[in-house]
Amino acid sequence: MSFFDNLRRAAENTLQSSNCSFCGLAQADLGICEPCLTSIEPMGSTCGICASAINDATHEQLNDSLQCGECVTNPPLYTKLVAATRYQFPVDKALSDLKFNKQLHYARSLTSVLERRIRLSYEETPYPKALIPIPLHPKRLNERGFNQSDIIAKHLSNAMGIPPNKALSRVKDTPHQVGLSEKQRRQNLKDAFQLEEGLPKHIALVDDVVTTGSTVNEAAKLCLSAGVERVDIWCLAKT
């Protein structure tokens, strides 16, 4: 075996078995060890549509699926949202470090958690035919240097064999959404997206965090108007 073959094998072994992104100690094939996975993975009772946390006083039982009051009275345009975990410590800090401190290893470890959740959620349902990362405006992409949703979509594509698709672009440089009401978020996002080409009938929009759902709902509206029949949302964390 040549020097370069040995070097390649060592690199592959390092990628396949790395320290846990969260505790930094245990060896973890997918970037997260079992104790940390057990700690962050539970989500409790969730709405079968938007994945918001629900309790006995705020849900209805419909077709053997829990649904929150908001989704019963004002359902979103997408069909189902699948999240890896809740947006709370230490996941909130991890995603902040991912976006603003270029700690890209968190994308790999949390995407592995999301993949587990997706496979459980689609046991009796076909997977989407394309993964559409929620895009950044070119100005913000140049500032950050990468789109975290694009990285998540690539990890999922490699793991699940679903092709990524960058037909969706962001043509409006919207201000940051943090601290805005849902109404203000919707106004910010009006006409923010554009489709460059056609899409399959069933797609998944991929994002890092979903809070009110305004961003993914606006993107879903555009995709549905262009002929898509079903839009699902896959994200690393849901508030």
Image (spheres, rainbow, N blue to C red):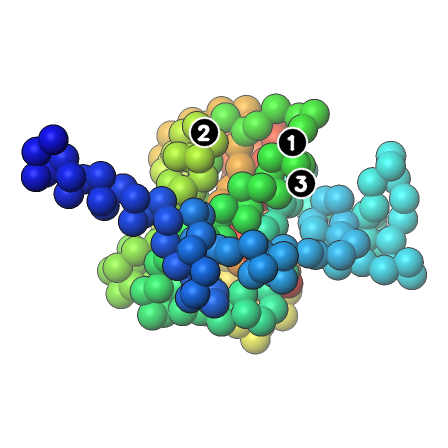
Nearer the observer, 50 or 98: 98
Asked whether disc 3 touches disc 1, contact meaning CB atoms under 8 Å apart, the reply is: no
Depicted 44 relative to depicted 89: above or below = above
Q: Residue furthest front?
A: 1
Tell me where residue 95 appears, x and y as whole percent. 46, 64
Query: Distance of mark 3 from mark 1, alpha carbons?
Result: 11 Å
Tell me where residue 77 appears, x and y as whole percent. 66, 42
Q: In the image, what residue type sits under mark 1?
A: Tyr
Nearer the observer, 149 or 103: 103
Q: Tell me which label, 3 or 1, sits earlier in the chain.
A: 3
**Rendered image: mark on residue 122:** 1
Disc 3 versus disc 2: nearer the observer:
2
Tell me where residue 64 appears, x and y as whole percent. 87, 37
Nearer the observer, 91 or 5: 5
Tell me where residue 196 appears, x and y as whole percent. 36, 35
Q: Residue furthest left?
A: 3
**Rendered image: mark on residue 80:** 3
Q: Tell me which label, 1 or 2, sits earlier in the chain.
A: 1
**Rendered image: mark on residue 162:** 2
Query: Distance of mark 1 from mark 2, alpha carbons?
Result: 14 Å
